[in-house]
Image: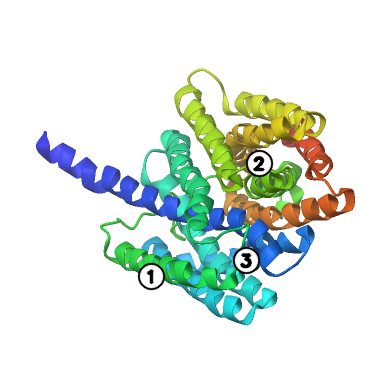
Amino acid sequence: MNGEVNSRWKSFVRPMIIIASLFSILGFAVGINAFFVPFVKAAFNINSAMSYLVTTATFSAFVIFGIPSGKVLKSIGYKKSMVVSFLLMALGMLLIVPAAKWISFPFFLFALFVNGIGQTLLNAALNPYITILGPEKSAAQRISIMGICNKLSLGLAPVVLALFMDTANVRLNDAIAPFYVIAGILVFLGALSYFAPLPEVKAAGEDENEPENGSVFANSKTSILQFPHLMLGALAIFLYVGVEMIALTSINDYAIEIGLPSPEKFAGYTSAAYVIGYLIGIFLIPRIISQINAMLICSFIGTASSLLIVFLPGTSSIYFVAVMGLANSLIWPAIWPMALADLGKFTKAGSSLMVMGIAGGGLAPPFLGLLKDHFSSYQQAYWMLLPVYLYFLLYGFRLYKIRIK
């Protein structure tokens, strides 16, 4: 009995704990953007649209290095890829120091782009690793647990940085010391990942000599472009990550705009709403509610929240920006299986296309910034959220079924 418990600890529980800590670091890295949006606007004397290039610099790496990351994984494996990703993220943090000294916004964006390369590789390594680590039927549960770790750290990042850097009295020299510390921590975590007892796992069909599982629907196709439900699903991922980043990165700036105290805490409210949604998913899916119905319910919540944000007074509406975290939480887990259904031998190519959709997180926030500058109001700019959630409803009700016809 003790031998069985010890074996499970080594093969499953211990790797789960290690990967959960890595997901937390990934969340913290993304959460830094939520703090930087209002900070760089004051530090570099730029407008809202320009300040949201912070997220564009990070997420553009997902498009440019999405496919190369897959090649790195295939070449050196999951574990070594995690090590390389932490070193790249550390380099990005170190490059922020000369950007602050030179007061160079372009170089600052370059530093975040390098950090984004590390995040791209870490995402490419962690997400399939945690999926493969245990039984396929419980993968959604493991992903939800990782999501909790990720979002809690994401919300914590602005609060931690606010201890060292004051958005009300911005001094670029304040940006130097914290990022030496963060870079050092990332290098330490890279070393820890290298020596951590993580088993090197492989997915079913990952070996080239292993036969592919067939699909009558897929066997009649010659390209992933012939799967409309996949293309529409990739668009859904693109839009999803866009509204996710809007909910997480704009709420602090919105709080500053309407004059609320301690604005850095509001991203934490959004993260808490994500955690609540993940917990609901862990306990209810699929025993009580299906993934598709969970997605539809979340899309309805997002639609209602979008309307309440623009019609309620600002001091009330900002809390519905946080509620978007709850609305978004169970949409991502549902879109993936719906979009990848019946792809057969094209499943891996379809997954690559879906990963590139993460770039939406870099384009939607600057567009929100443009609207905010045009209307001189975040509240009116948030109108852009409504058609996105309506698209999720359309995809959940109808568009993913196109392949059946």
Q: Is residue 404 visible?
A: no
Circle 2 residue: 260
Residue 51 against residue 391 in the figure, above or below = below
Kindly report the distance in space between the C-alpha atoms of the residues bearing marks 1 and 2: 34 Å
Q: Secondary structure at mark 2?
A: loop
> Residue at 36% across / 54% down in the picture?
201
Q: Amino acid at mark 1?
A: Gly
| Numbered circle sitting on residue 184 | 1
Say which residue appears at 55% left-offset and 44% top-offset.
Answer: 265
Residue type indicated by callout 3: Ala
**320 and 324: which is toward the camera:** 320
Residue 39 circle label: none
- Tell me the SS state at disc 3: helix
Q: Position of residue 53 (x, y in %)?
A: 71, 63
Mark 1 or mark 3: whose residue is earlier in sequence: 3
Circle 2: residue type: Leu
Q: Quadrant of residue 9?
A: top left
**Residue extending farthest right:** 374
Alpha carbon of mark 1 to alpha carbon of mark 3: how far? Answer: 22 Å
Q: For label 1, count other residues whose C-alpha is less than 10 Å away and answer few (under 14), some (14-19) or many (20+).
A: some
Residue drawn 54% across the image and 66% down it:
69
Residue 147 horizontal side relative to residue 51, left or right: left
User: Which quarter shows the N terminus?
Assistant: top left
Q: Which residue is mark 3?
A: 61
* Viewer-side residue, 265 vs 125: 265
Relative to residue 206, is residue 325 depicted above or below?
Answer: above
Left or right of 359 in this view: 123: left
Q: Tag 2 or tag 3, which sits nearer the N-term?
A: 3
In this rendering, the answer to whether 246 lies above or below 178 is above
Identify the element where label 1 is drawn: helix
Sequence-first disc among 1 and 2: 1
Callout 2 crowding tier (Cα within 10 Å): few <14, some 14–19, many ≥20: some
